[in-house]
C-alpha cells in the first residue's frame, strides 16, 4: 500500500501564483466555516490539486503545480 504524505496547509491568507498558458493565476488560502480552502478566480476548492485540475483539465499534483511542496 502506498504511503500517504501528510501535508500541513499553508498559512491563511497565503497566495501562490502560477503562469499557465500565458496567464498568471493566483491561488489564495482562505478559511470558511472552520475549514482551510483554496480560492481561484472566485471559485473555492477543497485542495490545491482540485484548483490546479480546474485549470489544466487533467490530473496534476496541485502541491507541486502551485509550488507549495518544499520536499
Image (cartoon, rainbow, N blue to C red):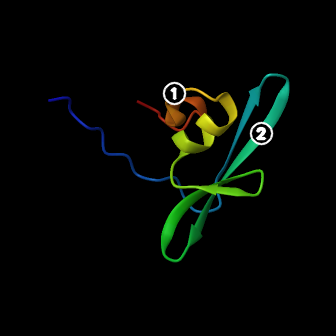
Rendered position, 35 above or below 19: below
Q: Quadrant location of residue 55?
A: top right
User: Where is residue 9 drawn, in percent x and y?
Assistant: 46, 53
Residue for badge 1: 59
In front of the other: 65 or 51: 51
Which residue is tagged 2?
25
Looking at this view, is 34 or 53 the one in front? 53
Report the residue at 48% width, 75% height from top: 34
Left or right: 49 as drawn, with respect to 51: left
Q: Describe residue 71's horizontal placement relative to residue 62 as left or right.
A: left
Q: Is residue 10 left or right of residue 17?
A: left
Single out the mark in the foreground, 1 or 2: 1
Location of residue 23 (image quadrant): top right
Residue found at the very far right of the displayed protein: 22
The residue drawn where x is 47% and y is 35% is: 69
Residue 37 in the image: state x and y as whole percent.
55, 60
- The crowding category of the residue bearing disc 2, from other C-alpha atoms within 10 Å (few below 14, some 14 to 19, many at least 20), is some
State the quadrant of the N terminus: top left
Pick out the residue farthest to the top.
21
Q: Position of residue 28 (x, y in %)?
A: 67, 54
Where is the C terminus found, in terms of image quarters? Answer: top left
SS at mark 1? loop
**Residue 19 percent coordinates (x, y):** 77, 28
Q: Disc number at residue 20?
A: none
Q: Name which quarter of the figure residue 43 lies in.
A: bottom right
Whether 5 is drawn above or below 28: the answer is above
Q: Pick the residue in front: 65 or 70.
A: 65
Amino acid at each position: 500500500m502506498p504511503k500517504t504524505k501528510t501535508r500541513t496547509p499553508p498559512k491563511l491568507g497565503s497566495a501562490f501564483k502560477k503562469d499557465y498558458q500565458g496567464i498568471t493565476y493566483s491561488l489564495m488560502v482562505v478559511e470558511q466555516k472552520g475549514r482551510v480552502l483554496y480560492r481561484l478566480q472566485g471559485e473555492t476548492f477543497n485542495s490545491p490539486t482540485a484548483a490546479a485540475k480546474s485549470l489544466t483539465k487533467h490530473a496534476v499534483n496541485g502541491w507541486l503545480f502551485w509550488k507549495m511542496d518544499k520536499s
